[in-house]
Image (cartoon, coloured by chain):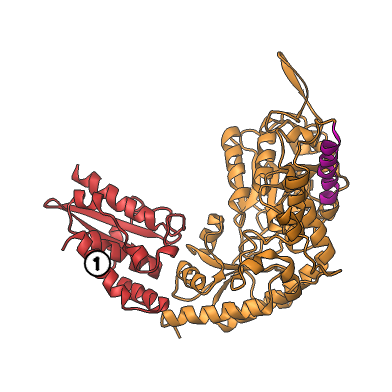
Amino acid sequence: MSIEEMQQNIIEEFTLFDDWSDRYQRIIEIGEEAAPLDEKYKTEENRVHGCQSRVWLHTEYKDGKIFYQADSDAAITRGLVTILVKVLSGHTPQEIAEAKLDFIDKIGLGKHLSPTRSNGFANMIKKMKQEAIRLSQ
Amino acid sequence: MQLYNSYQTSGQTAEPKPGQTIRPLFPFFRHNPDTVFLDSAATSLKPQSVIHAMLEYFEANSVNIHRGVYALSVKATEVYEQARQTIAEFVGAPSGSEVIYTRGTTEAINLLAYSLLKVRDELKDFFSAWQTGLGQGDVILISESEHHSNIVPWQMLASMTSAKVLFLPVKADGSLDYSPIYPKGSYHEAPVKVISLAGISNVSGVIHDLEPARAFAREKGAIFIIDGAQAVTHARFSLKNSGADFIAFSAHKMCGPTGIGALVGSRDVLSVMPPFMGGGDMIETVTTSGTTFNVPPYRFEAGTPAIGEVYGFAAAIRFLEQVGMAAIEEHERKLTLSALEMLQREQAIIYGPSLAQVQSGAIRKAGVLAFSLPGIHPHDIGTLLDELGIAIRTGHHCCQPLMSAWGIPAAARASLYLYNTEEDIEKLADGLRFVRKMFKKP
């Protein structure tokens, strides 16, 4: 499934919810369902800065594709980074670098996750793209 | 002039009282009727009279000060200089000439730190520890509960002089642990030259007992500075009674505008201190071979200042004086007790003094409440409360050493001021119950 198709799936899933609290509930669940990041990957190098909570991103490059794992000590952030990992993992560095990620606006949470917000969501995307490029070079 | 006139609306009662009845004086609530604003420790809301005073300058009198011979410039200069007197009286300083305008608390502390970098023996008649300038092994004493603004400038100064910064520990209840200096602790014999402490913590809200610090500073012949960012806003503060040599504070935390604040301190001391920045207004004469500096406070005010902001600053003080600092303190005390009761009821973890400690008067506390909910990250609390229109702050609150001392990565913080009400606290309680429900916590 392409990055775009993954995004569409997420958007479809979230349009089922009328209520913002249900959308947050689902984000929290997505975070809970994800396997926690191995403690050995929770390093300073893997920290995503600019987030109010602690966020880690571990990236691997295998057979021309990038695989991510991420974690956060805050539940909503954990859910959001898990969604990003689902959308971007398993794609080529070029696909990831060129990806236009607009699902966050379309699931009705954009106002909380704009680049000026201190949640560091934009930093997370930036780091994912940077790591993809770095590891493939 | 329509905008200007629109701010002259009525509704100003003779003696505004803290609480619900004061809210119409803050246009913010007209624009954001559904917001529960609990972040005044970050910045306070501005009353109409402050906005009006700034408009008066920007619309009717926006000329430069000090150098103009014309009437408008003279008038602006008068307002600007008169404001120093208003500020001095507000913090219990002898005269307006002891008031240096800065951009805020942060700049005030940086100003002191940079001036002290250049001091050699100029201060020896005032402070026995300052026979020489700051050097190898000299100590700047602060505490773990300081805001980064009262840590980083000192660390920078220390790195430039090989002096060192020592930290008084903070207790779990937020109060300062004076055991390293009092009566004879491990720091007691240290060559302390500067002591700089916050009057009120921006995280725990503790109104610190600074008397042991003052006594230690006198014993050591050290300079004693109070970071007054919170201390001057929540209760009546007197520089004279505090025994401090300097106090730094910001207008925007006391109903005034951003971008203006003050450093207040002894004129005699200031008159021997080297300038911080060079430029216009701070000089006496400039020739191609050098410059002689103006007297304080002007020596420390290079460049055209924030004139309109000074209009607003003075208006903020007039507003607070009209309400009365005693009334504000009493209002906050009641709300703080309600908020602590509520947090306890909602099973929150309270960082800082307990309800019992505040009730008994064992620890005095202003309306700044740091808390968390068991098993829920403060950032999640803040994000969900925001959806409900409740503005609190989450994170480290520019106090990372305090967070480390308490062993927590972050905290949620609700802070109260004269326009907050019992209803705000109930709404926060509803919000916290909602957050717990979202996380399926009982």
B116 vs B210: above or below: above
Q: Is residue B97 left or right of residue B262?
A: right
Instruction: From the image, tell me which residue sits under label 1.
Output: A8
Viewer-proximal residue among B52 and A1: B52
Badge 1 element: helix
Task: Note whether residue B368 is visible.
Answer: no
Based on the picture, tell me whether residue B156 belongs to the magenta stretch: no
Tell me the colour chain B is drawn in.
Answer: orange
Is residue B107 visible from the viewing direction of this image? yes
Indicate the position of residue B437 as horizontal and vertical percent values: 45, 83
Residue that protrudes farthest toward the front in the picture: B2
Characterize the local packing of mark 1: few (<14), some (14-19) or many (20 or more) Cα atoms within 10 angstroms: some
Residue B85 is inside the magenta segment: yes
| Picture quarter with the C terminus of chain B | bottom left
Q: Colour of chain A?
A: red
Q: Mark 1 is on which residue type?
A: Gln
Image location (x, y in percent) of residue B112: 70, 40
